Amino acid sequence: MIRLFLFAVATLALGWGFSWLADRPGLITVTWQNMEIETSLMVAATAIVALVFAVMFVWWLIQTIWTSPHSVRRFFRARKRDRGYQALSTGLIAAGAGNALLARKMSARARGLLRADQEPLIKLLEAQTAMIEGRNDEARELFEKMAEDPETRELGLRGLYMEARRLGANEAARQYAETAVENAPYLPWAAEATLEYRSQAGRWEDAVRLLDQQKIANVIERKQADRWKAVLLTARATERLESDPKGARDDAKAALKLAKDLVPAGIIAAKAYLREDNLRKAASVLESLWKIEPHPHLAETYVRARSGDSAADRLKRAEKLEALKPNNPESLLAVAQAALDTQDFTRARTKAEAALRMDPRESTYLLLADIEERETGDQGRIRHWLNQALRAPRDPAWVADGYVSERWLPLSPVTGRLDAFEWKRPFGQLEGPVEEGSLSAESAIANLPPLPEPQPVEPPSEPRLEPVHQPAKVVDIEQPKAPSLSIVRDKETSPVEPVGKPKPEVAAVSAEKPKEPAADPFNGRPPDDPGVKDHEAATAPTTRLKLF
């Protein structure tokens, strides 16, 4: 475009010049060696311009002839280089696609057309070809040579790092990542890997310092860097909570400034304040975080902030959470649990059913079962709620890479990824309930079995027992070969009489002597002494067993 503009300007300048000379005619006389040449001004100007163009053409022609061997050599060299780069490009594509045969063929062709010291990508193609062919030792040697070359050091270190990760050599991978960060701190993969390794080793100070360097160098986005730093500070605060509550509080507050919705940081800050007996600031932190994101762990920490509070005090704190975030399942469940502790079953049931209508989950059904057990104790109604709990979706939990944890962790135990845990339902429950045929919240409440009508219970009558006294009769039974069991009663001994046949003597005595009403020592009431088990035993003569 610029050349075309310059050509147009030059053409216009020449045209304007010739037009100016045409408007001003004149003669030019030249005398040279007794020769006089006379011509017009226009012809002289045209001749001068033509002479200049002729000289330029002759100079170009001479220069072309003089440099033609070099031009021809450069042409063939460029053609060879283009063929080499074409082979290199084809080989890299084949290696990426897993075509080992074509990659090896193109690698050999590229090495024949290009010089390896001038084109480092040939080493990369050879290393990738060796990797897809299973020659891992050769590939590792090629990556080590690339790591020694300043031009390909970063590429070689990344290849060695990936090979170490593939083989499970985590210590070697960590060393390669550390070396890459020292030589090139702007590499995102090296920075992220180093952060993960330092975090796994619990080196939170080094991890935070490295993250700050990456943030200044614009290697990591500002928003991502702030989130990761908040996670690292929360992890450090968790470790320092027992030994240094003040330091843990400062770290947790700094984490909350970077990530306002980080629930674990708020809980750590609140616990640190509670260890300092500063209930007001602990409640302020939890309330601020509750307004952003209601969480059951926040509710538990807030309601049970003071261990000496009564159930009524905990209910008041739960009601305050509900006022901050009304019509929320977590608020309703917090109030329901606190009302259950105060034996306010009606309110607990109402709040739990309202939470169930908003978000059916396993814990809500279990809470309703607890309310039913403590209020009515009806097994049918309890089994109804437990049956629904088995079919209901699971509660949200901390999930990272398919791993479900009861508490928040800064790193994934599966992959070691930083800030991997999220509060959500486990993946296995996304499709639907565990069992088919589960009822909706409204149906579950409507199908609750009714309470059985109470049956009138008659008070038991107290029977009056009258002791019957019969005279004891001694009957001698000879049993020479076996010991006999005798009854000693009133200093008289009588052997045990066999059961089955009535004794005619006893019957005769009973018939002759009529029964007399015996005195009741307890006046018709049960004995006050708990040791007396039988009324007859209390009034009967003393009896003991004697084994002969």
Image: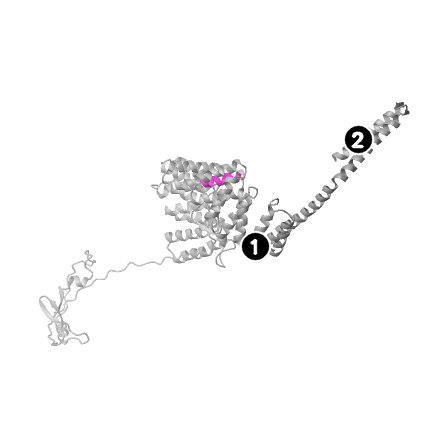
Could you tell which of marks 1 and 2 lies nearer the N-terminus?
Answer: 2
Task: Write the residue at 42% across / 52% down.
Answer: 366
In the image, taking residue 12 as reference, residue 79 lies left or right, namely: left
- Mark 1 residue element: helix
Name the amino acid type tagged 1.
Answer: Ile
Quarter of image, res 240: top left
Residue 301 in magenta stretch: no
Q: Is residue 449 visible?
A: no
* The disc label shown at residue 132, or none: 1
Count of numbered badges drawn on the protein:
2
Q: Position of residue 87 (x, y in %)?
A: 65, 50
In the image, taking residue 273 as reference, residue 429 lies left or right, namely: right
Q: Please name whichever residue, 527 or 150, is drawn nearer the observer in this view of the structure.
A: 150
Quarter that holds the C terminus? bottom left
Quarter that holds the N terminus? top right
Furthest toward the front, the residue is: 33
Q: Please name whichever residue, 110 or 475, is drawn nearer the observer in this view of the structure.
A: 110
Q: Please name whichever residue, 344 or 468, is drawn nearer the observer in this view of the structure.
A: 344
Residue 227 in magenta stretch: yes
Specify few, some or many for label 1: CA neighbours under 10 Å numbering under 14, 14-19, or 20 or more.
Answer: some
Name the amino acid type tagged 2.
Answer: Ala
User: Residue beneath label 2, please?
Assistant: 10
C-alpha gap between disc 1 and disc 2:
61 Å
Furthest toward the left, the residue is: 491
Specify few, some or many for label 2: CA neighbours under 10 Å numbering under 14, 14-19, or 20 or more.
Answer: few
- Mark 2 residue element: helix
In this picture, which residue range is highlighted in magenta? 223-232
Could you tell me if the residues under marks 1 and 2 are in contact, i.e. CB atoms within 8 Å?
no
Q: Please name whichever residue, 523 or 41, is drawn nearer the observer in this view of the structure.
A: 41
